[in-house]
Amino acid sequence: MLPSVAGKAVPFVELTVAHASVLTILAISFERYYAICEPLKAGYVCTKTRALLICLAAWTVAAILTR
């Protein structure tokens, strides 16, 4: 029974990581764009907590889209 579970889990994990990678790079690009266009506001808007939430959202969306 383990090989069938592992056989389905490996492609799921591979695709989830690939999707999450793209979404994370997209989020970084938006953050950099905002930091360049609005440098005085970026310090208040781009916080560590918000970055963590965006990363968690990227992984969640990637896992949902992979199904």
Image: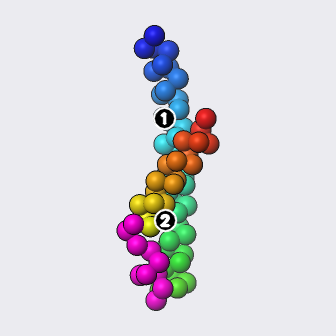
> At numbered mark 1, what does the secondary structure look like: helix, strand or loop?
helix
Q: Is residue 33 visible?
A: yes
Q: Is residue 19 visible?
A: no
Mark 1 to mark 2: distance in Å?
22 Å
Q: Residue at x 49, y 48 (%)?
A: 59
Whole-percent x and y of residue 9?
A: 49, 27
> At numbered mark 2, what does the secondary structure look like: helix, strand or loop?
helix
Whole-percent x and y of residue 20?
A: 51, 49
What predominant SS class does the magenta segment belong to? helix
Q: How many marks?
A: 2
Of the numbered discs 1 and 2, the one sitting upstream in the chain is: 1
* Quadrant of the drawing holding the C terminus: top right
Amino acid bearing label 1: Val
Q: Residue at x 52, y 47 (%)?
A: 60
What is the span of residues highlighted in magenta in the rendered image? Answer: 40-49
Q: Quadrant of residue 43?
A: bottom left
Amino acid bearing label 2: Ile
Residue 28 got which mark? 2
Residue 13 got which mark? 1
Neighbour tally class for label 2: few under 14, some 14-19, many 20 plus, Cα within 10 Å: some
Q: Residue at x 53, y 29 (%)?
A: 11
* Quadrant of the drawing holding the N terminus: top left
Neighbour tally class for label 1: few under 14, some 14-19, many 20 plus, Cα within 10 Å: few
Whole-percent x and y of residue 6?
A: 45, 21
Residue 1 got which mark? none
Whole-percent x and y of residue 27?
A: 52, 63
Judged from this view, the residue extending furthest toward the left is 48
Q: Residue at x 52, y 85 (%)?
A: 38
Q: Nearer the viewer, residue 15 or 57?
A: 57
Q: How is the image coloured?
A: rainbow
Asked if residue 44 lies in the magenta stretch, the reply is yes
Asked if residue 2 lies in the magenta stretch, the reply is no
